[in-house]
Image (cartoon, grey):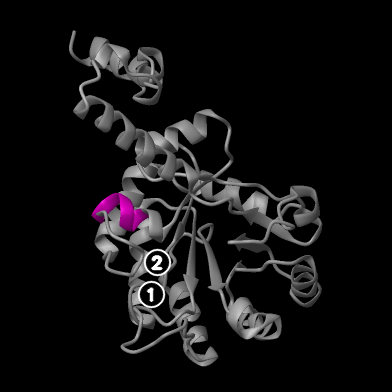
Amino acid sequence: MNCTPRRQKLRDIFHGDRCINPGSVYDPISARVAEDLGFEAGMFAGSIASLTVLGSPDIIVLTLSEFTDQAHRICRAGELPLIVDADHGYGNALNVKRTVEELETAGVACLTIEDTLLPKRFGAQTAEFLEIPEGVGKMKAALAGRQDPELIILGRTSAVGPNGVEDGIRRAQAYLDAGVDGIMFVGVKAQPELEMIATELAAPIMLGGSGAELQDLEYLGQCGVRISLQGHQPFMAAVQAMHDTLKALRDGKPPSQLEGLASADLIKQVTRDASYQAWQEEFLS
């Protein structure tokens, strides 16, 4: 895997003037589908990793090695630049440094480190956040773990919703001052919030969990947003399709009568059958 070119492609987007929606991916096949359909980047979320690898809810029971292994499988399947949600970095600042080292080796193009206090503290009823100095320490450790300067490291905060936009901006500016390449905001719902953020921060922005009025890519691009997540519907659709197919079979429906199955041509495409056929002819003949 030559990872630097795909990281450079993603950097060009972050340094440009437009916003894109990445494709939500979770395994090699979904990443190839996204790449074949023309998505300029893929997004592998911690929540989807927990579902894919463990079949568990998003409560930080996934380990770094499990997350990294799946990210590596996705990256080696093609050339799609992969953005990953590295959650809290799997521990304190030293763990964050290790997280960056492992994910860079896995081939990711961009990762986010958030300032939420994770895993959930005993007795906590609402989201809690690190004190800003500890968050800054995590960002500095993340940068120290980077070897390829083209790897994009973003600070991430979801403090705008519970704490207000001013706290979100204060946190983001501290992380930018520490040297991160940009900021991911989760839970920005309204245009006035985004416009205040765009006015105060001179840095690329990534959005997740945004409100309905923050979906227009042209408007987002004007506000400095370069990446806007749409959610993780592909995985949810795959789960529903798997459920419905297995249920139909269990209920006695003949396999020949099943609908919505991938064609043989599509399977050949996503498995890169032509390449394997060529390699067989070259190396096994």
Can you tell which quarter of the image residue 173 is in?
A: bottom right
Q: Would you call the spot at circle 1 few (<14 residues within 10 Å), some (14-19), or many (20 or more)?
A: many
Residue at 34% across, 86% down: 121
The secondary element bearing badge 1 is classed as helix
Q: Is residue 66 left or right of residue 44?
A: left
Q: Nearer the viewer, residue 168 or 103?
A: 168
Residue at 33% across, 71% down: 98
Q: Is residue 43 magenta?
A: no
Q: Is residue 78 visible?
A: no
Q: Position of residue 260 (x, y in %)?
A: 40, 22
**Residue type, numbered disc 2:** Val
Q: Nearer the viewer, residue 189 or 174?
A: 189
Q: What range is drawn magenta here?
A: 49-54
Q: Main secondary structure of the magenta part?
A: helix
Q: Where does the C terminus fall, quadrant-wise?
A: top left
Q: Label 1 near label 2: C-beta < 8 Å?
A: yes
Q: Where does the N terminus fall, quadrant-wise?
A: top left
Q: Which mark is residue 96?
A: 1
Please tell me whether residue 141 is drawn above or below residue 240 in the rendered image: below
Q: Position of residue 127 (x, y in %)?
A: 47, 81
Can you tell which quarter of the image residue 182 is in?
A: bottom right
The secondary element bearing badge 2 is classed as helix
Q: Which mark is residue 100?
A: 2
Q: Position of residue 217 (x, y in %)?
A: 74, 49
Q: Is residue 109 left or right of residue 192?
A: left
Q: Nearer the viewer, residue 214 or 40?
A: 214
Please tell me whether residue 264 is drawn above or below residue 214 in the rendered image: above
